Image: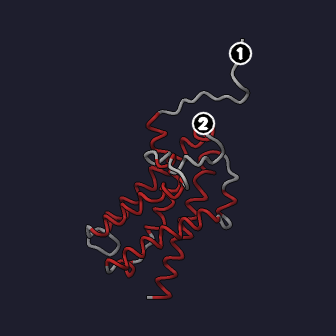
Amino acid sequence: MVGKPEGYTMNTMSAGVEWMLTTAGLGHRKPASGTWGSIPPVIVAGVMIVAGVGPGDAYGWIYYLVLGLVLVVYSGACIVYGVDAEAKWSKDPGQVVADETAGQCITLMMIPVALVGTTISTVMTLLGCFLLFRAFDILKPWPAGAMQKIAGGWGILLDDLIAGLMGGVVVLLGAVLFF
């Protein structure tokens, strides 16, 4: 009788959970799945800013609420289902980009009002937020890199939240120094 291979884990992850962890399947896109997972929050932020619901606008609280909800929902997915994702794919699997989606929100929530006054400044700011977050996520300077040693969902998530915070701090410092 042929048995299951050593280390075999039955895949019990639902399609909905996989959809959330891969940010609507973007985690399966190659190359650079993390880059793909970072794009949706930037698009959402850009649409809200264009619609007059961005930092400094009368209804700017909606901007922070929406990005905050995205941050919480995608962070929660990583925390709750991270162990399942690692059992299905590997340690901190590339398919899981919910962590990038969450981390990117932090950088975007730190955009100062002064950087979204015109169309060109808004586009440049969003691009800068995207590139800064991706750079910190890829390079993983301390303490972000140390977080990956943590098992499960927290290990998947924490380095990206720290990268998001680092990116946001650079955006804020840039605004203070240049505006």
Element class at badge 2: helix
Q: Is residue 6 left or right of residue 74?
A: right
- The reply, left or right, for residue 53 in relation to residue 43 is left
Task: Check the image and report above or below for 72 versus 12.
Answer: below
Q: Give the foreground label among 2 and 1.
A: 1
Placement of the C terminus among the 4 image quadrants: bottom left
Q: Which mark is residue 2?
A: 1
* Location of residue 57 in the rendering, given as x and y in whole percent from the top left corner: 29, 73
Instruction: Locate the N terminus and report the quarter of the image it occupies.
Output: top right
Q: Residues within 10 Å of mark 2 (few under 14, many from 20)?
A: some
Mark 1 residue crowding within 10 angstroms, few (<14) / some (14–19) / many (20+) = few
In-front residue for pair 133/76: 133
Q: Are marks 2 and 1 in contact (CB under 8 Å)?
A: no
Give the label on residue 88, or none. Answer: 2
Indicate the quadrant where residue 53 lies: bottom left
State left or right for residue 26 relative to residue 44: right
Q: Marks 2 and 1, Cα distance to the nearest angstrom?
A: 21 Å
N-term mark: 2 or 1 = 1
| Image point (32%, 80%), residue name | 118
Q: In the image, 159: left or right of 6? A: left
Residue at the image point whose x is 58% and y is 40% from the top: 85
Q: Position of residue 2 (x, y in %)?
A: 71, 15
Percent across and percent down for residue 46 are 35, 66
**Residue 48: quadrant of the picture:** bottom left
- Amino acid bearing label 1: Val
Q: What's the colour scheme?
A: secondary structure
State whether residue 57 is above or below residue 90: below
User: Of the residues shown, which amino acid type is indicated by label 2?
Assistant: Lys
| Element carrying mark 1 | loop
**Residue 159 percent coordinates (x, y):** 61, 59
